[in-house]
Image (tube, rainbow, N blue to C red):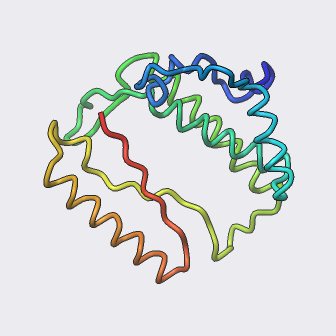
Amino acid sequence: MFKQDIDRYKVGNPRTFHYLNQSNCYEIDGLDESEEYLATRRAMDVVGISSDEQDAIFRVVAAILHLGNVEFAEGEEVDSSVPKDEKSCFHLRTAAELFMLVNRINCSIGQDPDSKFLIGVLDIYGFESFKTNRCFTGTLLYSSWKMSKYLHDLHQIWCADVCFFA
């Protein structure tokens, strides 16, 4: 990734992102990340993804990385939470800025707000609630799969499940 893109997407050292620092593997011998980044951009060009759309994709990925760094503390009201500290506030603000820009880009490239087609994220709450996720995990994954299948069959949309285990 180039310096200008690192600044634009507000990313940097992968060690600073929770979703990336869990394996302690940050480099692969013989792999040039800048070449891989350019190859990815070229591949996106080849399949017809415009520069604005590519920018939106990278902003979403960067926003998700920042959201992974947000920690919450118990709020004053029942079942509420607040960002734990200033670092969490920073990552939350950064993610919001990155998502806001994606929204502006979608509008600028003609995304029809009345369109019957959209891309969304379906998050099933629950994994965070238990220290050990044995039977519950299976049940949750099954219900998530059934809901994804239902949405696909009903609306002809694709759903992808992403699970992060601590």
User: Residue at horizontal 34%, vertical 30%?
Assistant: 82
Quarter assignment of residue 38: top right
Furthest-bottom residue in this view: 154
Residue in front for this viewpoint, 44 or 147: 44
- Decide: is 22 above or below 120: above
Q: Quadrant of the N terminus?
A: top right
In-image side of 74 versus 94 (left or right): left
In-image side of 108 versus 143 (left or right): right
User: Residue at horizontal 53%, vertical 38%?
Assistant: 64
**Residue 107's spot in the image, x, y percent?**
77, 56
Furthest-front residue in this view: 30
Q: In which quarter of the image is the C terminus?
A: top left
User: Residue at horizontal 62%, vertical 43%?
Assistant: 60
**Residue 78's spot in the image, x, y percent?**
19, 41
User: Residue at horizontal 45%, vertical 75%?
Assistant: 151
* Count of picture labels: 0
**Residue 117's spot in the image, x, y percent?**
64, 73
- Decide: is 128 above or below 83: below
**Residue 114's spot in the image, x, y percent?**
68, 73
Residue in front for this viewpoint, 6 or 39: 39
Residue in front for this viewpoint, 122 or 80: 122
